[in-house]
Amino acid sequence: MSETYSWPVAAPLRGARLRLEPLTVAHAREAVDFLDDVRLHRWIGGSPPTREELRRRYRRQAVGHSPDGRQGWLNWMLRRHTDGQLVGTVQATLHRTGPDRVEAELAWVVGHDFQGEGYGKEAAAVMAQWLRERGVARFVAHVHPDHRASAGIARSLGMEPSEEVHDDEELWTTAPDAERRHDRRS
């Protein structure tokens, strides 16, 4: 029998310019608009999803954990305060690395038309702070080596590139000590 865990539930969060809304199936209606751009998929892989594909994906993800309960799934949609426009997503996949240690694999996607405004950095920082407050000890992210904007977001969270490469993306990580140092600088 596999061990299952109780995971935190995504809560509504606020940044200076963005609301981070916990993912619901209803978000598929709007998200398909910013995800339907081949330029975006250069970095995130795959191809633009249909609304129905997003509904199925969001239905699985909104549960908040993997089917076996071994991973926690936290997903937020990014909405601008000024006009209510949905501009992207952030997510954290949680897993236990020890009895009292949780690691979060972070990811962010900002629609191509909204890039270059700092939305990804703002939302990732809000999410990371929320995760730290819940005891997450370490962050990891997979970043394409040519994607300077994503590398900048990872760096702003205190991550550094490792020598590990998975599916053409470099693994970026924070060590627990580096995470505490970053927390004091913030």
Image (cartoon, grey):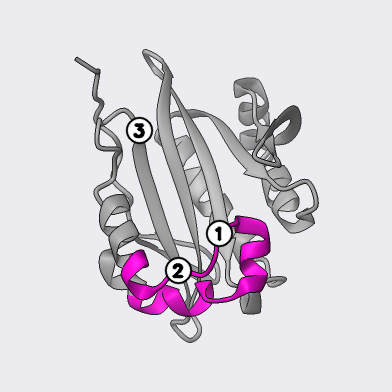
Q: Earlier in the sequence, mark 2 or mark 3?
A: 2
Residue at which label 1 appears: 46
User: Farthest front residue?
Assistant: 47
Mark 2 vs mark 3: in front: 2
Q: CA distance from mark 1 to mark 3?
A: 23 Å
User: To which quarter of the image does residue 133 belong?
Assistant: top left
Q: CA distance from mark 1 to mark 2?
A: 8 Å
Q: Secondary structure at mark 3?
A: loop
Q: Is residue 178 above or below residue 19?
A: above
- Residue 99 drawn at (x, y percent): 36, 13
- Identify which amino acid the numbered label 3 is placed on: Gln
Q: Quadrant of the N terminus?
A: top left
Q: Earlier in the sequence, mark 1 or mark 3?
A: 1
Residue at which label 3 appears: 71
Q: Secondary structure at mark 1?
A: loop
Whether residue 32 appears in magenta in the rendering, the answer is: yes
Magenta segment, which residues?
A: 29-54
Q: Which residue is painted at 68% across and 51% down in the image?
A: 153
Nearer the observer, 133 or 41: 41
Residue at which label 2 appears: 49
